[in-house]
Image: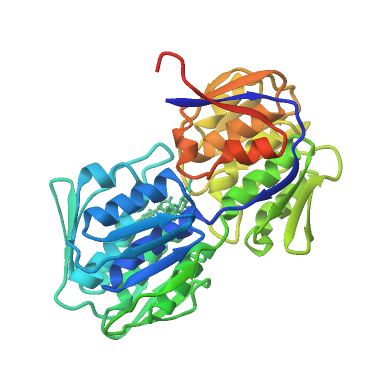
Amino acid sequence: MESFLIKGGVPLHGEVAISGSKNAALPIMAATLLTDEPCILRRVPDLSDTRFMVKILESLGATARFEGGTLTIHARKIKGYADYDLVRKMRGSICIAGPLLARLKRARISLPGGCIIGARPINLHLKGFAALGAKIKIEGGYVEASVRKLTGNSVFLGGRAGPTVLGTANVMMAATLGEGVTVIESAACEPEVVDLANFLRAMGANIAGAGSPTITITGVAKLHGAEHEVIPDRIEAATFLIAAGATDGEVTLKGARGDHLRAVIDKLSEAGVAVERRGANLVARRKSRLKPADVTTMPYAGFPTDVQAQMMSLLALAPGISIITERIFESRFMHVSELARLGADIEIEGPSAIVKGGRPLSGAPVMASDLRASAALVIAALAAKGSTQVTRIYHLDRGYEGMDLKLRKLGARIERTEEQGA
Ligand code: EPU
């Protein structure tokens, strides 16, 4: 297993290019199953998660070529069965269910199971499929959905924590080849849903309202191959903006979408970090000393749960009390005890973390527990005095393309090493 060795205390300076979005790419890759013609996807980030999705698509019968960020997928003939061993490793793989059901009228997929950040049920995905006429059976750890003909309907996809991103994606994809009109109410408004809708439209789908809580899909008989460029990763971008503020540096983000980052930019400003647009770039630097801020994670356009951990590292450096409330995933606080090892003073009270910021951080060995928690530990380590070893960085490699290389270019002292004894 690999780890990062980080010598902290160096302000980050320079330019960083933002990669394509992981969470946009995964459902878009799944959508290529909807046609028997080849699709070409550009700006696909080279990550263990996207490589894994390629494996899943290949296991279903598709052929794929992935070179220099361009992925060509051809799902000429496919089967509708996805094995436990493949699905359990990546929860996002559930988004193959909608396309399989639409194309083959049958999908048998292992239930993804829980994950470290929360329970992650798929009841809303199944509710949507059932509304389109599918029969759902759960047996032996697998969910089996089958239908003679998918038929348009109106379905409300709001859950206990608000809309569901991949649930919206799944139902939208299934409805593209259904008969008649499907209306998804309380749909997720995330930019990744809009990007998927744009790709589906390029394939010939008839979709209106993506990006709003009401999405209308009018079924078509067939979808064709298409080309698409994936949107830049707003979570990677947010991570670099925060790292710039945490290290008191100045970082220019190339290719980031400021319009996808409004809630993050607003909170950063409150915390003393200015983000300015300069031409096509975003530039982040401190505008004052760091200040506390209260953050509550919410569905888009609110503050993203995927940036909560990284923001906590920044606020641990801001003198005063910040309250961070997690409203999307109940157990997404695994980073708190690791940040404490670096000297942060944070207490968990129900869904909130109370950050008593401003204590000096100093390097220590810490362990990554999930993707965004790993990024939070890297940010804290960059700001801490001394050396930090972050172990289990395979979590980070799932969602950040060449994070160590990008940080090194910005002046960080970061090395990828083989863990001792591993
Ligand atoms: N939920 C239900 N029932 C469902 C589905 C979801 O109750 O059927 C609940 C969840 O338990 C959660 C909330 O609804 O409380 C939102 O979950 P959502 O379904 O939106 O999450 P997701 O679609 O499975 C995607 C991202 C996550 C990101 C969330 C929220 C992908 C591949 N994953 O997951 O990304 O945190 O949306 O924005 O797009 C990450 O990149 O680190 C990551 C975890």
Within the image, what quadrant is residue 199 found in? bottom left
Depth check: 149 or 227 in front?
A: 227
Q: Is residue 238 above or below residue 315?
A: below
Depth check: 131 or 335 in front?
A: 335
Residue 164 visible within the image: no
- Coloration mode: rainbow
Q: Percent x, y for residue 155?
A: 35, 72
Q: Percent x, y for residue 46?
A: 47, 49
In the visual, does 384 lie left or right of 185? right
Q: Percent x, y for residue 357?
A: 72, 30
In the visual, does 323 lie left or right of 121? right
Q: Is residue 140 above or below residue 260?
A: above
Is the N terminus in the top left, top right, bottom left or bottom right quadrant?
Answer: top left
Q: Residue at x 86, y 42 (%)?
A: 288
Q: Residue at x 28, y 43 (%)?
A: 88
Q: Residue at x 34, y 67 (%)?
A: 32
Residue 97 visible within the image: yes
Within the image, what quadrant is residue 130 found in? bottom left
**Number of dots carrying numbers:** 0
Q: Residue at x 73, y 31 (%)?
A: 317
Is the C terminus in the top left, top right, bottom left or bottom right quadrant?
Answer: top left
Question: For the view shown, which residue lies furthest in the right direction?
Answer: 288
Within the image, what quadrant is residue 108 found in? bottom left
Q: Percent x, y for residue 238?
A: 64, 49
